[in-house]
Image (cartoon, coloured by chain):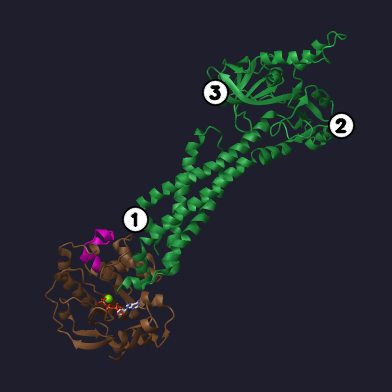
Chain colours: A brown, B green
Amino acid sequence: MADIRRKGIHIEAICKRYGKGDTAVDALKGLEMQVFPGEVVGLIGPSGSGKSTLLKCLGAVIEPTTGRMTLGGEVIYDNGWKIPDLRALRRDKIGFVFQAPYLIPFLDVTDNVALPPMLAGRSNAESRKRALELLEALDVAHRAKAMISQLSGGEQQRVSIARALVNRPPVILADEPTAPLDSERAMAVIRILNDMAVQYETAIIVVTHDEKIIPTFKRIYRIRDGKTQEEAGEGRALNSIDSFAVLNRFPQKVR
Amino acid sequence: MISLAGRDIQHAWGKFVFTGVGLGLLIGVTLTMAGVYRGMVDDAKALLDNSGADLWVVQQGTLGPYAESSSLYDDIYRSILGMPGVTRAANVTYLTMQVRHGGQDVRAMVVGVVCGGAGQPGQPGYLVSGRRITRTHYEAVADMASGFKLGDRIRIRRNLYSVVGLTRRMVSSSGDPMVFIPIKDAQEAQFLKDNDAIVQQRRRTAANPLFNRPGAPGLLDAVIASQSKNPYVNAVLVQIKPGLSPEEAAEPIRRWKRLQVYTREQMEEILVGKLIATSAKQIGMFLVILAIVSAAIIAFIIFTLTLGKIREIAVLKLIGTRNSTIAWMILQQALALGVIGFVVGKIAATIWAPFFPKYVLLVPEDAARGFMALMVICVFASLLAIRTALRVDPAEAIGG
Ligand SMILES: Nc1ncnc2c1ncn2[C@@H]1O[C@H](COP(=O)(O)OP(=O)(O)OP(=O)(O)O)[C@@H](O)[C@H]1O
Ligand SMILES: [Mg+2]
C-alpha cells in the first residue's frame, strides 16, 4: 500500500501567482490534493477558481510559485526546483485528454495514437502495435486507418484517450472531456476512463462542470478560491452502461 | 518516427502542389532570365567562332569591329598577308540594318565577305542548303533565323540580292541573323548615297576652285570618281599557322603595321565584358528581384501554413515533441515546396525557351546553382515560421 500511495498524484501546498505587483493574481493558494493509481477523481469548481491553472502546473507547462508535486512516484517540483526534462516528463508520465480531441489532422487514427511512443524513441512497428492494442481496447480499431476528420465525435474522443494512455503514463489529466458530448456519450467516456484507470493503474483527474457526470466520482475535489476541499462523491455504478455501444451508435461530431 | 512534414504534405497536397506550381512558374522565369544571359554570351561566342578568324585587325585605338566602329583601307590585308605566321587574311564589313523582303523587313547583320569556300575567314562554316556566293555581285547567303528562303529576292539599300544559300546559328552579338553578301556590294551598301545626295556632292566639288581648275583638266573627274568609291572595310580577319600562339602573330602586326590586333580571348573579353555587360547587369538585377520575390512568397506560404497549425503544434509540444522535430517539419515543408517549384520551373523554362525570339540557352550549371540558391532561400524563408512555431506555448493546448 505504501508503494501505491507514493505513486499517483500528490500535491502539497501548491501556490501559483500570475503576474507581479498590483496586477498579480493568486490563482492557487496552498492547494492540497492526492489521487491514487486506479482512481478517477473529479475536480470541480466555479469559473476562475483555478482548475485549468492546476492542470497546467501538473502538466508541467507552467511552473508553480511554491509547493511540491509528485507524479508517479517522482518529485517533479519542489519549491522552485523542477525536474530538468519537462518535455520527457510530459511525454512519458502524463496523458492529456481535452474538451476537444485535439488530434493531429494529417495523421491517421493509428499514427495519432502511435505518435507518443514514437516520440519516446520506440520503433514505428512497436508503436503501431501498442496503438492498435489500445484502439482495440477502446473499440475503435475498425477505424484504425481512417483520417481524423472521418470520425464521429465519440470516436475522436476515444482516440484521444488512446493517445493519452499509449505510453502507459501513471497520470492522466482530463480537462472537460465530456463537455461537447450528450449525456449518454459523456457517461460512456467516464466509464472508459474508469476502466482504463483500473486496467493500467493510472491516476486520473477529470476537470468538469458537467452535472451529469459528477455523481459518478467516488471522490471529488471542490476547488474554491485557490484551495481544495475534498468531498465524498456518490460513486454511482456505471456498469449499466455499455459504453462502446453508446459511443458507436450515433456519429456525432465534436468540433 | 514517421515524417510529420511528409504526412502533412500528403494531407494537404492540393494546396501544396498548387502553391508549388505557382512558385515554379516564378522559378521558370528566373531560370529563363539566366538562360537569356547565357544565350547572349553564346551568341557572342557564335559570332566569334563563325568568323573563322584567329586574329581581328582593326583601326588603331578602337575596340572594333563589333563593339565600336572601325575602318581600314581595303588594301591593308595584302600587307598583313606578308606578316610572319599569317596564312590567310580577308576583308570583312559588318552593317546592322533592316533587310527588306517583300513588304516586310527583318533586322539583320549584313556581312560583306570575300568569295571563297568553307574555312575562308569570314565565310560561314557550313551551309544548311544551297551554295556559297560565287558571283561578286547581288548574291546573298542568309541565316535561317531571318526567315528567308532559297531563291528569295531581298533588298539591301538600293540593290536586290537573291538568296543562294542558308546557314544556321550565324548571328550577331545581339542575336540578329546574318546575311552574307559580296564585299564589294557591302562596301557600297555602307557608303551608297541616293541620287540627290550624289548630285549635291558633285555640285559642291565642282564649285570648289581647288578641284575645278581650268589649268588642270581631268582633275575634277578624278576627284569625283574617288569620292564616289568606298575604299574602307571594318576589319581584316586573319588566320595563322597552326601551333603558333595568337599573341606571337599579333605582336608584329601591332608593331609594324601600327594597327590594333585582337586575339580570340581579347575579342571575347570585349564582347562579353563590354558589349553585353549592361544587359548582363540588367538581367542580374532581375535575378536579384526574382530571388527576393521567391523568398517572400515561400516565407509567406510557409508562415500561413504554420499559422494554420498552431493548435496542432501546441498539442505536439504538450505530448513531448522536441522543438527540433517541429522546426525540421517546417523546414522540410519549405524545402519540399522549393523542390516542387524547381521541378515545375525547370520544366516550364525548357518548354517555353524555344519560343523566345532570341536564343535562350539553359545551362545545367545554372539550374544547379539556381537549385542551391533556392534551397538556401527556403531555409531563410522558413525561419520566420519556425520562430513562430517555437514560441507556441504548450499550455495553449490545455486552454482556459
Ligand atoms: N496567464 C494568466 N495570467 C494572469 N492571470 C491568469 C492567467 N491564467 C489564469 N489567470 C487567472 O487565474 C485564475 C484562475 O484561472 P483558471 O483558468 O485556472 O480558472 P478555471 O478554474 O480554469 O476557470 P474556467 O472554469 O472558467 O475554465 C483566474 O482568475 C484567471 O483570471
Ligand atoms: Mg478552465
Task: Please tell me which of labels 3 and 1 falls first in the chain.
Answer: 1
Q: Amino acid at mark 1?
A: His
Residue in the picture at 61% in, 44% down: B281
Q: Residues within 10 Å of mark 3 (few under 14, many from 20)?
A: few
Q: Residue furthest right?
A: B215
Residue in the picture at 31% in, 73% down: B398
Residue in the picture at 29% in, 81% down: A50
User: Which residue in the structure is indicated by mark 3?
Assistant: B147
Label at residue A51: none
Using the image, name the chain to which the residue with label 2 belongs.
B
Task: Please tell me which of labels 1 and 2 falls first in the chain.
Answer: 1
Q: Amino acid at mark 3?
A: Gly
Label 2 residue near ligand 1, CB within 8 Å: no
Residue B225 is drawn in which quadrant?
top right
Residue B245 makes an appearance in the image = no
Give above or below for A30 relative to B84: below
Task: Determine whether, in the image, residue A118 is placed left or right of residue B191.
Answer: left
Residue B188 falls within the magenta-colored stretch: no
Label 1 residue near ligand 2, CB within 8 Å: no
* Residue A164 image offset from top left, x and y in percent: 30, 72
